[in-house]
Amino acid sequence: MFNRRLRSVSRLTAVLGFVTVFLSLKYLLFPDNGDNEYIVATQTAQLVQSSDMDGSRKLEKTNSHKYEDHVRSCPEYASYAAVPHFKLDDDLNTALPFQRPPSNCRTFRSKLVDAFIEQMKLKLKDQNLARLFENTFPNTLDTTILYHVTGEQNKRLQNHGLMEYKYRNEHPETFIVTGDIHAEWLRDSAWQLSVYQPFIKYDESLRELIRGAINTQSQLILSNAYCNAFHPPHYTRIRRAQGHIDDVFPRPNWRQVFECKYEIDSLASFFTLSRQYYENSPKEKRLDFITDDWLFAVTQVLTVLGRESVSTFDESGNINKFYYTFKRNTNVASETLPLAGTGNPVNMNTGLVRSAFRPSDDSTIFQFFIPGNAHMAAELEHIISILKEYSEIADEREITVLLPKIIKGCEKFVTSIRKGIQEHAIVDHATFGKVYAYEVDGYGGHVLMDDANIPSLLSLPDLGFVSADDPVYQNTRKMILSPEGNPYFIKGKYFQGIGGPHVGLHNPWPLSLIVKIRSSNDETEIMEALKLLMETSTELGLIHETVNGFVPGGHVYTRSWFAWANSEFAKTILHIAETKPWLILKDYRQGDKFSLQEFIKSLSSSTL
């Protein structure tokens, strides 16, 4: 993606107002096509600037942007999110903005989720944290469900007219955008929904929504297995964003594909979405996501993994066939692949799988991307168990007779990837000892770094690949959370964390602090990271993609509307509540337990 940076606005309120009008028109007339925008929080004319004694800029809030629960015309949320809104009873001197869209503009409603938010707010000690949770937890449901039909609705609509696809009209479908871009990323949408998975046991409409997301992802993978981001299906009649038509082999269907960067973690995220549905559904419903499309999508994933396990050269030194190439006309090195789109060479007999791009959508340097391989191995272990259970009840038909072969294929990759990581991805660091490399090539080449996007080295316990107390992981964690060990650890004066090449060297990603919290058992570290996240979210009450660490107050950031980060933050608050409730919940002492499942269950009995 291209970066366009807006310079800091003038101190003059008149100029400030002009910038606000310009940006509002820009977002209304020219919706973001995926470019990273630097947004300065002081670009709203309804915030009056003043100077502190130390010369820093301070924002005085007015109530010009009061929240309206119902509106005649729904605003475009990217511009709505870039301006603070307040309820009538908010204390403007202390309150964070209320950034949920008007009730009649929300893209999906769950009574259980709304009831949970109200009760969870009452439990949280810090009122600003309560408001931040209130904004972030429902953000994906409120703003990104651009298309959803239940199975019953799909039967009536008959969107799939071709005889060979008519069976799809029996199932729900859901199309989820990442936020300010009208396209669905397999990875982002899976993680966006993750925070709601614990609720689907009690909320049938939410379960149908997520089952629809699994069905949609199955279809997308079947049609374009190497691609990472997709346009809405034509029958949804959703406005499409301008995508990237690149020189890609195999050539995708550009009417369906927004971007076709092959990322192993996109395919693993499809399994994450499916596995979490299985784990959280009622026992009698937990296998109902398995359709023929889903099973064929699994076989497609295994085919891609097999092809991308092939080395650059064979044993005779001949060049093997390349199953995927990518070339983009760009002057940004991380937006394309070297060597005529094939990527740098990888060695044979490693057991690892290539990934042309990282979860940041930047190209890999060495194509054995370790967090992505770890993510895939961890999810395949779960898929094996799910398929074995399903094989006991499956009717005999074309695809189900292949179940033993599919299970065997999954087992092969779990074994080879785990062995490959142990043999090729653990390296000796002079300062930190044995650590996991970020990328390797099988020749001994390796990259020692981490990027904020999930999967990352920091997220390995979150992915289920290793335990958080694993010695190699702990060494790796120390390395990647220090500027001495990670070239993309950004130690800004006002905000510190892991960044990456995608946005630049000034901007840590809040995602890295979110994962830092979830991978920590240190209460001081947890609360310091949470404090930083809150300090950079005070002006708009949402979690941004990145924040400039060298500008105070979180005023300079990218993307006012980034649903994935909002979901991850909310999930982290629930994680703290379950593991160390005394840190954030009222009336909890050290050692007390909070059960999220019991809390949801009690609410469901009185709500649904």
Image (tube, rainbow, N blue to C red):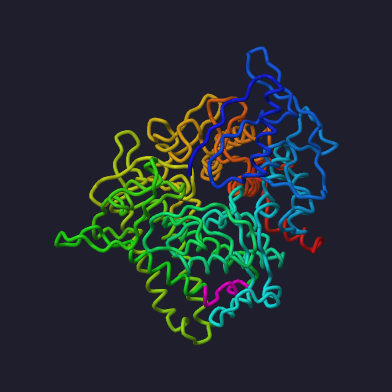
Residue 565 horizontal side relative to residue 424, left or right: right
Q: Nearer the viewer, residue 512 or 555?
A: 555
Image coords of residue 420 (percent x, y): 31, 57
Principal SS element in the magenta part? loop
Q: Nearer the viewer, residue 223 or 497?
A: 223
Which quarter shows the C terminus? bottom right
Magenta region, residue range: 285-293
Asked if residue 475 shows in the view, the reply is: no
Residue 347 horizontal side relative to residue 209, left or right: left
The residue furthest right is 89
Position above or below: 100 against 14: below
Q: Quadrant of residue 576?
A: top right
Position above or below: 366 against 3: below
Residue 535 horizontal side relative to residue 366, left or right: right
Residue occupying the point 68% across, 38% down: 24
Magenta stretch contains residue 89: no
Q: Quadrant of residue 488?
A: top left
Position above or below: 389 against 368: below
Image coords of residue 99 (percent x, y): 72, 42
Image coords of residue 100 (percent x, y): 73, 46
Q: Nearer the viewer, residue 468 or 116?
A: 116
Image coords of residue 362 (percent x, y): 42, 46
Residue occupying the point 46% across, 85% down: 398
Residue 410 horizontal side relative to residue 60, left or right: left
Residue occupying the point 78% across, 54% down: 115
The residue furthest left is 316
User: So how many labels did they put on this image?
Assistant: 0
Q: Nearer the viewer, residue 423 or 512?
A: 512
Magenta stretch contains residue 287: yes
Asked if residue 266 shows in the view, the reply is: yes
